[in-house]
Image: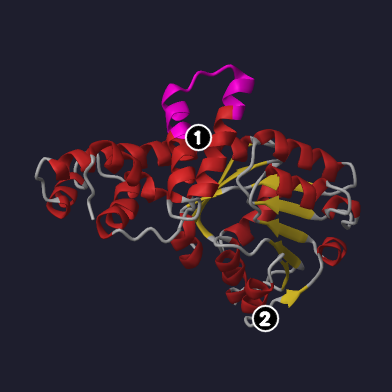
Amino acid sequence: MGNYGDVAGFIGLGIMGRPMAENLLKKGVKLFVNDVLEAPVAKVAALGAVPAEAHDIASRCDIIFTMLPDDRISELVIAGDGGLASGIKAGALVVDMSSVTPGCSQRCSEALKGVGAAHLDAPVSGGEPKAEDGTLAFMVGGDKADFDRAQPYLELMGASVKHVGGSGHGALCKLANQVMVNLNIAAMSEAFVLLCKAGGEPWAAYEAIRHGLAGSAILDAKLPNIINRTFEPGGKMSINFKDIGNVMATARECGVPMPLTAQLFEIMRSMRVQDGPDEDHSSLVRYFERLANYYLG
């Protein structure tokens, strides 16, 4: 058990947030927690967390972690009326691990600086499995001194914790990450629909491909889902669709054409209509199966 002097708070105990909070608790961090749902709060309370209202977390905690669904909610919780910035103790640090736009992160940072607190944008990659086993990858934007303060805590939840620049740079890094992750899943899905419809054996092909140049963490994590038809969410389609939407919005602001990502965004939009938002993003394969009129399972 570690000796962590800061009183810590955690807001947002969803698919990712709950296991992340549990890893902090298991390593000896004193944690006040909050979520809109009672069930995840009860689960972490059973491990020693203290349920608390957000305003109490703001006034009592030295370091506060947030893991929230989108820009609107993240900005509301951190910088909105009655949010953390309205009652936070001087010198406190908010570490927002949500996947949001760089603009959202920068606005939250400015709101907190205005009341004598600090902010890091620290989105993660790895999905629910790596949240569970504490091996997430953190990409962190903000002041280096604030990063140094948060790093020991982030290392309880992740295997890789990297400072990537100033405010908003963590969010930018996550956007790039999401482009590569989701386009990889789409390319892998298209390739394996071709392979299987042409008569190939998927497991044999997987074992051959994974040891070559096309081998990747995405292939290892997501192709078994596709072959086994197990689309329970580790990374929900709805969250990834939101992230790709953030990519496109940021690209428009910067004047960067993204033709592949634009097509992916429309594919994901059609899947939300036809298949729903709550399956894992490996279910992208369904789109390519419909095009080919061939179904792997």
Q: Is residue 259 magenta?
A: yes
Magenta segment's dominant SS is: helix
Give the camera-side residue of 281 and 289.
289
Q: Can residue 194 be seen from the camera position used here?
A: yes
Under tag 2, what secondary structure?
loop
Can you tell which mark lies on residue 252?
none
Task: Identify the image quadrant of residue 279.
Answer: bottom left
Q: Report the residue marked by disc 1.
A: 176
| Amino acid on which the number 2 mark rests in the picture | Gly
| Amino acid on which the number 1 mark rests in the picture | Ala
| Position of 92 relative to 79 (above/below) | below
Q: Residue at x 23, y 41 (%)?
A: 293
Query: In screen coordinates, is 256 left or right of 150?
Result: left
- Which span of residues is magenta-colored? 249-266
Q: Report the residue marked by disc 2.
A: 48
Q: Give how far across and how far down residue 143 sits, in percent.
A: 71, 41
Q: Sort mark 2 into few (<14), some (14-19) or many (20+) by Cα contacts within 10 Å.
A: some
